[in-house]
Image: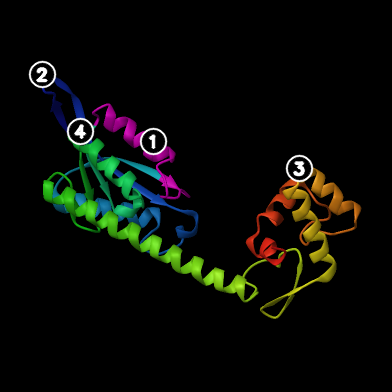
Amino acid sequence: MRKRTAKNGRTTGQRMTVGYVRVSTDEQAENGVSLGAQEARIAAYALAIGFEVSELIRDAGASAKSLQRPGIATLLERVRRDEIERIVVAKLDRLTRSVRDLADLIDLCAKHDVALVSVGETLDTGSAAGRMVVSMLGVVAQWEREAIAERTATALGHKRHQRTAYGPTPFGYLRKGDRLLPETNEQQALREAVRLDESGASFRAIAAHLTKIGAKPHRATTWHASSVRAMLRSRIATEAVA
């Protein structure tokens, strides 16, 4: 912990080293990703380098797709108040998985003379080289996520085209093994629902019509505006009556 001296020469107060840890819901039990494992890595790194981590800020069950997290909000506010000298994370993706958000974080830290340290990547944005490498890693990470998303979308599109089941059976179909087969009565009801939607009818009105003609939803006892909307916005369902 040290004091910061502003450009006008006045001391602005004590600044500290803060650790940040995060897990999303599906990572809670994974070795090396849990909050405890991240905290242990940060503590070991701090001991080896010789500085004291004054506080740990945690985000449990929070996605890194955006910065809309309570812990990050607290962290950034304290950076803006010039209370932090150094932020330490176990891995860069604990902070964010977005290149744009990463760039914004680096800019904010640079503006307030805060070093961003990643233990896993052995990076420190206290130097220009460290800032460059962190930015490059963020670009590569985002490319990898987008490539995975493209492959997934292609695979699901192929499954839709082949009428292969890959999730809950959509209205209008019966499941036979891994194949989806059209169900005559439901296909007719689906066509009527699509026609009403295209004519400007509300989802509530379409739900009432489906109930009136005796069409039953697959996973509920009655139709609601939300279930009608989900059905009509299902690509596999609407492709069938296009």
Quarter where residue 114 is shown: top left
Q: State how far apart marks 4 and 2 are (Cα).
A: 15 Å
- Horizontal placement of 10 versus 75: left or right? left
Q: Could you tell me which secondary element the residue under label 3 belongs to?
A: loop
Decide if residue 119 is in sight here.
Answer: no
Residue nearest the observer in this picture, 27 or 53: 27
Answer with mark 3 or mark 2, whichever residue precedes in sequence: 2
Q: Position of residue 147 (x, y in %)?
A: 39, 65
Badge 2 amino acid = Asn
Residue denoted by label 3: 202
* Of pointers 1 and 4, the one earlier in the residue sequence: 1
Give the residue at mark 2: 8
Above-or-below relation of 124 to 140: above
Residue type at the position of mark 3: Ser
Q: CA distance from mark 4 to mark 3?
A: 51 Å
Q: Would you call the spot at circle 4 few (<14 residues within 10 Å), some (14-19), or many (20 or more)?
A: few
